[in-house]
Every structure is written in structure tokens, then in C-alpha cells.
Image (spheres, rainbow, N blue to C red):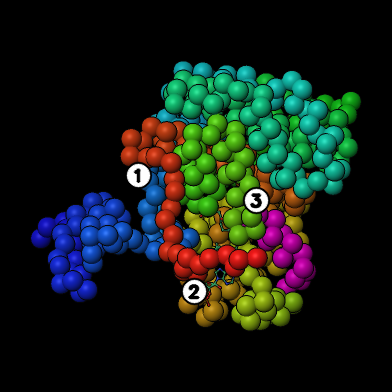
Amino acid sequence: MADTLTIIDNRTGRQYEVPITDGAIRAMDLRQIRTADDDFGLMTYDPAFQNTASCRSRITFIDGDKGVLLYRGYPIEQLAERSSFLDVACLLLDGELPTADQRQAWTSAITAQQRPPAGSERLLPGFPRDAHAMGVFVSLVGALSTYYPDAKKVTDPDNRRRQIERLIGHVPALGAWAYRHNRGLPLVEPDPSLSYAGNFLRMLFKEDGREYEPHPVLERALDILFILHADHEQNCSTNAMRGIGSSHADPFSSLAGAAAALYGPLHGGANEAVLRMLLEIGSTDRIPEFIKRVKAGEVRLMGFGHRVYKSYDPRARIIKRTADEVFAVTGRNPLLDVAIELERIALEDEYFVKRRLYPNVDFYSGLIYQAMGFPVEMFPVLFAIPRTAGWLSQWDELMRDPEQKIARPRQLYVGPSRRDVPES
Ligand code: SDX
């Protein structure tokens, strides 16, 4: 049997052979299917791209039915247990885990970029004191494009690498600045002697005039959470990164757009929404009443469901295990009992079982962040910082892909046909 699709257009009786490659047909192969010479040809209609591959990628693979997540072929469970976030960032970008020498060079390159450009901290007073941390983060990332005009040379691989190192190095400070601004606290300069996660914790929580040492359990837990959030195929925010990047915009502007997409409550804003949902439910005895509202379509069970995973999100399983280690240090988060009971009920309830709705990466992460002292508005920032490595890996892959060009979807026009403006 050949790897082709035979299509018979019943409007004309004509038959077409369309090749099948990697389990897909090229949408452009459908344009030959016409009813007349001036017919534009057949298109596919796929709102929200539920069944459309936008690119070929070698970075991340998900099997939603089996709950499998691989970064460059390595299972997420093994990377969370045996690797570090910076090693994983290197893996996503370069395709291999670094050797000891490569790790040294990579860590030095990122550490050299821990401090955003001098003067960029003067942007902060322009934000309201109660500005949402993610709104500040998105704005600061975009603003950095004005400090690095050389970032526009997007077709130069060496220049791309320099911007990639700048962004991965800078984003922890940008996140910490948003947090410190909200609290009217002085900014804390980066400490190059600390790990990526440790330096971030110190820039957030160091008290004036006192030394700060990150707790090793919390530092490792955050590093694992960063690994779990680093990349995830062509999700909404990565699609934004690729879409903006396809116009050859600089990576700071593209990444600001990706972070803006992540801010949405259906995407990266879900971990904040989960915490607010658990706080609203308050206690396990109020869960049945909430489930009733979900089934009535009044509210969504935030932290549940996924476009790809139709089984347990493997990241949620790891996060749930990491929560126990964090709570052993911080004290148990009382909302954990509500979350565990909510999960137990949902996993047995026909409404959720029929729709294959399981806990996703956001369901438990917020509980850990809250226990570690992060306010809920910092949760999407905690997602954006590690996902910066994934967004940039996908962007770099886009820029190297000879098949790619500026993204411009078609549409099915269903509006009014030509008409004349009435004579006045
Ligand atoms: C992330 O793509 C990624 O990889 C994203 C991410 C990443 O790492 O980048 O994994 C991170 O964004 C995880 C998802 C975080 N979002 C949430 O937890 C918000 C709550 N989840 C839903 O809004 C929803 O599940 C989505 C948005 C995640 C997925 O939505 P889909 O695939 O478009 O599914 P759908 O909206 O078409 O829903 C199918 C059915 C519907 O019911 P019916 O119309 O068939 O009756 O399932 C229902 C939906 O109403 N449904 C839910 C639900 N999610 C879907 N019902 C209640 N609660 C939910 N959470």
C-alpha cells in the first residue's frame, strides 16, 4: 500500500493522489482541487489549529494518551530527577545534554547575563504599585528590545545565541523586580555564586541588611519546577513566539508576545486561577457544590484538562511528589486537602471521565509556590521564566527551518459581498 491519499472530488468526479508524509498531508496539496480554473482551490478549516501541524520540530514530544513527555528524547521524569534546569535549557537549545566543559561554559555565559542592562530598572517606577507582576514582566521583556538594537540581526546564528543567553540570564531578575516593586522593596543585585534557582530566590526574598541563603530543598524544588515548565510542543504561547518570530521581529519583542499569551487564564495563568479556585472553595465539604457549578458550565475546574493530554499530565505527577518535599520544610498547605479531595472526586465523576479531564501541570504547582511564599500574581511569572528557554529553542529552530516563512493563515470569508456606500 502506498503512502498516499486518493481524493475524489464528487463535485467534478476528478481524482487526486496526495502524498502522506510523517502522518500528514501538505495543506497546499489540496489547492489543486478546484471546480473551475478561477477557483482558488480547496483549503482546510481548523479553528484553534486543533488538527494542524505548523512546523517540523525536534525539541519536545508529547503522547497525550500515554501521558508521555520527552525533551529531545529524554523522559521528563528522568530529567526532573537527574538533571538541572540550566542543563535542560542547554539540551532544548542544542539537542544534547552538556558535557562538563560545556556546562561550565554555558553556566558562565548565563551568569554573565544575570543583570538586565543598567538603567532598565528605572522603568519600574512607571508601573502602579499594585501592578500585576506578569504585566510588569511582559512590559520589561519588550522594553529590553530598546536596549539591544543588535538583537534585530535575527538571521545571524551567533547573534541569536547572544540574545538567547541575555534573555535566559535576565528573566529571573525581571521576575524578581516585579515582585520587589509590588512590595516597595529595594532591588537585590544578582549573586553569581548561586545557582540559577538560588539566585532567583535570593533576588526575591533577601531582606535588607541581612544575608540570605536559599534553603536547599526549596532551591532544588524550584529547579525541578523550572525543568517541568521549560517546553511543551506547540502550545498557545510557543505558537505566539513562532508567529511573531516569523516576521523576523527581534527575540525580545517575540518573547514579550509569547509571555503575553501565557498570561491568559486558559494557559499559563491557570496556576493562579487554580489557587483562587481552591481559596474560593475553602474546605472539602464545599467541593460537591463547586462540582455542581462546573457541570452546569458556570465555572471551569482550573488545573484540569488539556488539549493534548487525555490522561494524567506527567508533570502534575512529579509536582505532586515535589510538593511533599516542600511541605516538609514549609509546613503543609491546608489547601492541599481540598486539592486532593477535588482530584479524587473529579477522577471518579462521569462528567470528567467522559471528557478525559485530568490534573495538568497547573493543578498542584500553585500550592507549592504559595507554600514557598510566592503571591498568586507571581505564578505566571514562575511559568514564564523557565519557558523562556523553550520559547527561544523553538524560535531558533524556526529561524533555521528552510520551510518556514512569515506566518499568515487564510480565512473563510462569510461577511457581506461587495456593496456601495450610499450617496450622501
Ligand atoms: C497549560 O498546550 C500546552 O501545552 C499548555 C501547557 C504548557 O505547558 O504550555 O500544558 C500549560 O496551559 C495547561 C492548561 C492550563 N489551563 C487550565 O487548566 C484551564 C482549565 N482547562 C481548560 O480551560 C481546558 O481544559 C484547556 C483550555 C486546557 C483545553 O481546552 P480544549 O482542549 O480546547 O478543550 P475544550 O475547551 O474543547 O473542552 C472540551 C470539553 C468541553 O465540554 P463540552 O463542550 O464537550 O461539554 O471539556 C470541557 C469543555 O467544557 N472542559 C472542561 C475543562 N476543560 C475542558 N470542563 C470543566 N473544567 C475544565 N477545566
Of labels 1 and 2, the one closer to you: 1
Taking depth in this image into account, of 281 and 329 the one nearest to the observer is 281
As shown in the figure, which amino acid type bears the numbered disc 1? Arg
Whether label 1 touches label 2, CB < 8 Å: no
Residue type marked 3: Tyr
Name the residue tied to disc 1: 56
Can you identify the residue that label 2 sits on?
Answer: 355
Q: Which mark is residue 403?
A: none
Q: Position of residue 74 (x, y in %)?
A: 40, 42
Report which residue position mark 3 lands on.
263
Distance between the Cα atoms at labels 3 and 1? 26 Å
> In the image, what residue occupies the spot 49% across and 34% down?
248
SS state under label 3 = loop
User: Local crowd at mark 3 within 10 Å, few (<14), some, or many (≥20)?
Assistant: many
Residue 402 horizontal/vertical position (percent) = 33, 35
* Tag 2: amino acid: Arg
CA separation in Å, label 1 and label 2: 29 Å
Span colored in magenta: 269-284
Q: Which of the 4 image quadrants contains residue 193?
A: top right
Say whether mark 2 is within 8 Å of ligand 1.
Answer: yes
Estimate how packed mark 1 is, as few (under 14), some (14 to 19) or many (20 or more) residues with alpha carbons within 10 Å.
few
Q: Is residue 227 visible?
A: no
